Amino acid sequence: MKDNEKSNQELKNLPPGIAISWGLGKQPQRGPKRELSIEQIVVAAVDIADKEGLAALSMNRLASSLGFTPMSLYRYIPSKDDLLLLMQEKISDITYPKEKSETDWRENMRQYVKIWVKVFHEHPWFSDIPITSIPLTPNQLKAVDMALRTTRNLPLNDYEKMSIVLLLSGYARWCGTITKDMNMAIQTGKSLSEINGLDYSISLKKLVTQDRFPDLYPVLMSGAYTEENEDANDIKDDFNFGLERILDGIEHYLLLKKN
C-alpha cells in the first residue's frame, strides 16, 4: 500500500465527530439539501445549552428548534456524543492575542488561564461534559498549542511543558466550575450571604469549637472563613491568588532546575 493510501485509510478510522471537526465528514446524500448544515446544528445546540443547560439538550429538542425531524439531524451528525464533541469544538474557536516579545511567561500564562475561565463562564455547560480523551479536534489542539507557547522559552522538557499545560488548563476548568455552581445557586434563589456563609456566621461560631476544629477555629473567629471582615485578609480575589501561587510554584521549579 502506498504511503498516501495508508494515510487516507488511517484518517478513515477517526471517530465520526473528530472526522467532522477536521472537515473530513461527508455531507448526507439524502434528506434536506441546502436547508441544513453541521454548522447550523452545532450553533443551535450551543444556544440551547447556553440558555437552558446541557440537561435540556436532546436531539428531539434540537430538531424541533430547527424545524426538522431528529432523523434529519442524524444524517449530519451520527450521535449525541458527536454533537457534544462538536459543541466543545465550536466554543473553543478562540482568537488568541498575538504574541508579544516583551511579555514575560507569567503574564502569558495568566492570559491563557483567564481566556479559558471566560469560556467556562460564557458556556457553563462546558464543564458538565466529562473529559474522555486528550484534545483531538483542531480548535482544542490550538488551545494546547497556545498553552505550550507560554512555555516556549523556558528550560523545560516536553513532559514538563505538557504537565504545566495540564496544570493551567485544570485550574481554569476548576475556576469555571466554581463560578458556574455559584451562579446557579444565585439563580435558584440563594443570596451571596448564604453562599459565603455570612448568614450562618453566628451559629458556626457556636458550633465550631477549638478542641474539635483546632485549625479552622481561629480562621472562623477572625471572620476570614465567612468573609465577615474584608480587612482581615488582603486577598480579595481567590482565583487570582490561586493562580499567582501556581505561577510562583512554576518559577520556583525553574530556579531549582537552573541551580
Image (cartoon, helix red, strand yellow):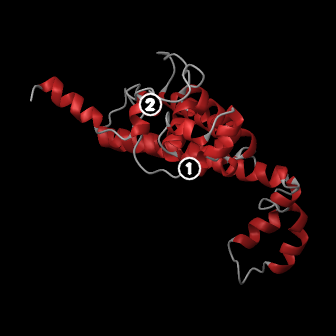
User: Secondary structure beneath disc 1?
Assistant: loop
10 Å crowding of disc 1: few (<14), some (14-19), many (20+): few
Q: Residue furthest left?
A: 1
Mark 1–mark 2 Cα distance, whole angstroms, equals 17 Å
Rendered position, 105 above or below 77:
above
Residue 153 image point, x, y percent: 37, 26
Type of amino acid under label 1: Ile
The image position of residue 205, as x and y in percent, is 85, 74
Residue 55 on image: x %, y %: 67, 52
Mark 2, Cα crowd under 10 Å, few <14 / some 14-19 / many 20+, is many
Q: Which residue is mark 1?
A: 129
Image quarter (top left, top right, bottom left or bottom right) of the C terminus: top left
Relative depth, front residue between 201 and 41: 41
The quadrant where residue 227 appears: bottom right
Q: Which residue is mark 2?
A: 21
Residue 116 lies, in percent from the top left, at 58, 36
Task: Name, please, the residue furthest toward the front.
Answer: 30
Residue 125 located left or right of residue 37: right
Picture quadrant where residue 154 is located: top left
Q: Residue at x 75, y 69 (%)?
A: 218
Q: Which residue: 63% across, 47% down?
A: 58
Q: Is residue 156 left or right of residue 81?
A: left
Task: Give the left or right position of residue 7, taking residue 68 as reference.
Answer: left
Q: Amino acid at mark 2?
A: Ser
In front here: 99 or 173?
173
Task: Judge by depth and name the residue closer to the eye, 226 or 177.
Answer: 177
Residue 86 image label: none
Q: Residue at x 37, y 41 (%)?
A: 15
Q: Is residue 93 visible?
A: no
Q: Residue at x 59, y 32 (%)?
A: 41
Q: How many marks?
A: 2
Mark before the other along the chain sequence, 1 or 2: 2
